[in-house]
Image (cartoon, rainbow, N blue to C red):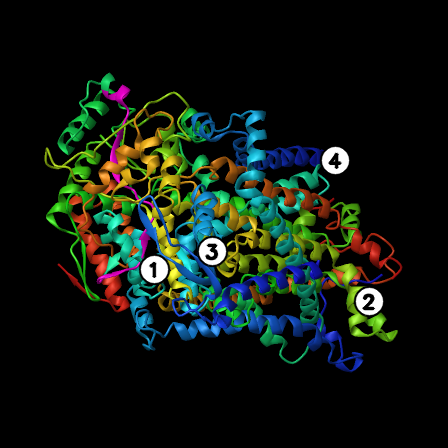
Amino acid sequence: MKHGVRKIAAASGLSLALIFGAAACGSSTSSSSADAGSSGSGTGGGVTIDGIKWPVYKGDTTLTVWTWAGAPQTTEVVPQFEKIYPNIKVNVENVGAGSELYSKLATANTAGSGEPDVVMLEYPYIPEFVQSKAITSISSYVQPFLSQLPKWATSAVTFNGQVYNMPFGGGTLGLIYRSSVLTQYHLPVPTTWATFASDAEALHKDNPNEYMTYFPNNDGEYVLSLLQQAGANPFTDNNGNWTIDLDSPAAQKVMTYWGNLIKQGDIAVQADFTPAWQHSIATGQFAAYVGPDWFPSAVLVPYVKAGSESFTVTTMPQWTAGEDVTANNGGSGYSVTSQSPNKQAGALFAAFMDLGGANTSMAAGSLPVVSNPAQFPAYTTSKGTQTGFTQNLNKTYQSYQADVSSNFTFSPWTTELNNDLNNEIAKAVAGTEPWSDVLKNTQNELAQYVQGQGYNVTVG
Amino acid sequence: MRSKARLRFGGTFGMAMLALIAAIVIVPLYWLVVASTKGNSTLFNSNTFVPGSFSALGSNISQLFTVQNGIFGQWLLNSVIYGFVTAALGTYLCTLTGYAVSMFRFRGRAALMSGVLGGLMVPSTVLIVPLFILERTMHLTDSYEGVILPMLVFPFGVYFMSIYIGEAVPSTLLEAARIDGAREFQIFNRIALPTVVPGMVTLFLISFIGTWNNYFLPLVLVSSTAKYPLTVGLSIWLGSVATPGVNQALYPQVILGSLVSTLPMLILFPFLQRYVARGLTVGALAGG
Amino acid sequence: MSRSAKVTPVTLRRSRLNRPGAPLAMVTPFVVLFVIFFVAPLVYSVYTSFKSPLTGQLSGWANYRFLLHDTEYWQGLQRVVYFGVIQVTVMIVAAMALALFLDSPYCRGKRIFATIYFLPYAIPGVIAAIMWGFLFTPQLDSLLGLPRDFGLMNTTVNPLGSKLVLYAIMFIVTWEFTGYNMTIYLTSLSSIPAEILSAARIDGASEWQIARRIKIPLLRRTITFTLVLSIIGTLQLFNEPSVVSQITSLPIGYTPNLLIYTTAFSYGNIPLAAAMSVVLAIITILGSLAFFRIVRSREKERPARKARRSALAAAQSPGRTGAGVDVPEGSGVR
């Protein structure tokens, strides 16, 4: 057994050396090779696909990528990338989703070594890694691709004028509803929040076992996206001096709205992504969901009894009738790490996962982040439906991309914010604190903590 | 006569209590088995305690071992490697150390025991980061030994063995061997070890399970999917539950995977129970 | 055959050791590993606790001062102390009772029951959140409605509600570790020679008396050991609250160690987390020292126990012909 372990260890040591040793022994003879980690005379790129130009990359190199994406991205798009860039080998490692990956990244950053070349990061968590210098600016490499991205996406990945991430997936919000339920209780499809509220009241009165939708008490990011849609922008960054304005009138409007509905008992409060919540969805307890593009395939289709429900997607309810504003909940992109010796290759990979893989993604029902979806054939050819839906979800959700408010910045303290916000919401739900205090208290707790850490913060 | 009646009453009452407690203990395990026989939507659309179908179980099993190129099998193998190597080496090491600490007086003994106890009392969460840094400099990250070596430091094991050995090893036996001129290591390996087999077996079991279920250490120290143990692997799958994508693992894989994860213990424990039985030690000392 | 229940190292005279360096050689492997993989990271952590999280420069006692005013941390500490008083008592008593019963001749199917009770410890943590998510949700777990069906309560039990969640966590920890502690007791019980027990039985002692007068006293050090570990485990409670926090709303500072983990890995604030760990370690050490002192003083208070033990030892000396184990006064036998 011990010998076997040694053999495996030797092999792993060897492969590690190959990956990180490339940095040491790479001697670029070609002057246009921009990466310290590449060597040799391989070449790739120089093609145009779906109207997008992929530049030439000279030299042989290997990329290590940490991502929790699955098929078809890892199974089809990565090989497509390697076909166009045969001189770039890609090693994909799934080291955990979200917080697992982030703790590994943070640890490697602290240690000064151990980071991969490319990491997947959700948008709300990019600022903290910019702050800790775990990831690096890729502006110079991805400049030609930025016009392909919708405004909100460029805004989500740009900090102090530098681009730190190439978006890859989004979470554009729409309203998913069950027409059978609305018809049964004579409820109009809610185009405004006011109608949504009256629908909720009427539905719950007629059937105390059903609710218009749920409100999560553990999902600060979702709440933040609701604030985004209302026009709130809680965090402003002036070159390291942050202003926190969580308690703005726009944000208050949102909290008061949901607080009233919850107090009246017309909306169910549940922790999302728990068995209890999944059960409620599966058994049809809710008539509608404020759901992003990943909602149907991740949360509805696998769990709802096949054929038992049909869903329709429409625009998110608006605060003012006639407006067309939505927000983004979730989604992630790829960043290049500061420790990587292959920054250009990594940036090309990051761009390719979204733009090069757009066709494959659309065909599989996960939506790429693009400003002009029509330039990809799959947009027109794929049916874009899923079980329980009749409409082309690709087309529907893609059409909302332009309406996502781009005046929104995430802070470097997303986890702290979420925890504080969830805490206050829990207190408000329990009745120990008025809903009007939730944002103010969250703001104060957050400010106190980050000031204690040494940040220069103004509360406004 | 009175004691016979007492025996029967005590026996029946005791057995009834035993069965009742066992029933409570087993409810979550029963859930685990039942949930493994259900597909995704059945899981949330049926009564929790009603079994699913054999066909669903079958498809779950085949999915479990084929999803993502059958990575589950690799994770299972890794857990076995980490578990066995750590438990075997660790048990021997703890027994050796515990023996020295409980059977001898030597300079630094008190310091060592304080260190061992201190090791138990320090919350180990934050030690991970310096450990990672240390292993990077030693080029131990992302390797099997990089995970095993830190796990060999098992203060609980040393403490447990020092107490158990103190209880179980008769000093007179050691005296006799010394008089006969045996050397200390020989005495340890040939004479003392056989008498502490029950303790070693228990420690092996506890260490094996502790290693098998260890999640955080391998998560931080390992960066290749192929080297992850089951715990980390299943947790990765769990994280993917909310991420759309074809052929992603969903709840049934995580549940069945966890059930499979408990099977080795299910086999090991009764098998090793034989060694934790009274009479073994007595037999070893017969003729003394 | 002679046996004493406890070996006193004093009986070994150094000069009689064939190789005096032997014990040092024996502990060396462990010590080396311990220093490299525990002491070094620990020293580094303590050093880190004096750094500023933002700049990485030394900032003196700043983190400790912040901690002093961190009400969440101290409330969490209070909570685990309360938790420990209840849960550890219940668990140790239950584990002891189960071990004694399984070790007695009353018990049939010892191996099966021992396996069942030990099983919870083997369930991987990753499934715990889903499992308890199912079992603790009233809509999913019909068993939670039983108290209402039997008229004992007027609503279904909601273990994840804020009133009961602490007790739900207690339940989980007890479920996980009772069998574990029971197994440790069974192992120690197995080292009691059968002759003592059969002799006592021949003398007419009941199982209960045997348990009380022979088994438990001989298990004293093991019991202390499990108590210390349980106390430490309670003060460092992390896994179970972390699991529960995934299925219901729970403040991140619910227990000190949960706060440490969140601060270190979710907030990326290693220095503050290191300071929290140092404080928690000190509290744990002080608590354990206090506990040891109590145990030692109780040992001194019970000379009768010592007399009993020496009587036991005397009864085991060679040449004993049979009955004659000194069952102590007032046992009511015969």
Say whether mark 2 and mark 4 are on the same chain: yes
User: Is C3 drawn above or below residue C133 in the view shown?
Assistant: below
Mark 4 to mark 2 CA distance (whole Å): 39 Å
Mark 4 to mark 3 CA distance (whole Å): 42 Å
Nearer the observer, A172 or B278: A172
Whether pointer 1 and pointer 4 mark residues with C-beta atoms closer than 8 Å, the reply is no
Q: Which residue is mark 1?
A: C267
Q: Earlier in the sequence, mark 1 or mark 3?
A: 3
**Is residue C300 rendered to the left or right of residue A140?**
right
| Residue stretch in magenta | A160-182
Q: Residues within 10 Å of mark 2 (few under 14, many from 20)?
A: some
| Chain of residue at mark 2 | B
Q: Which residue is mark 4?
A: B4
Q: Amino acid at mark 4?
A: Lys
A165 is within the stretch colored magenta: yes
Which mark lies nearer to you, 2 or 3?
Answer: 3
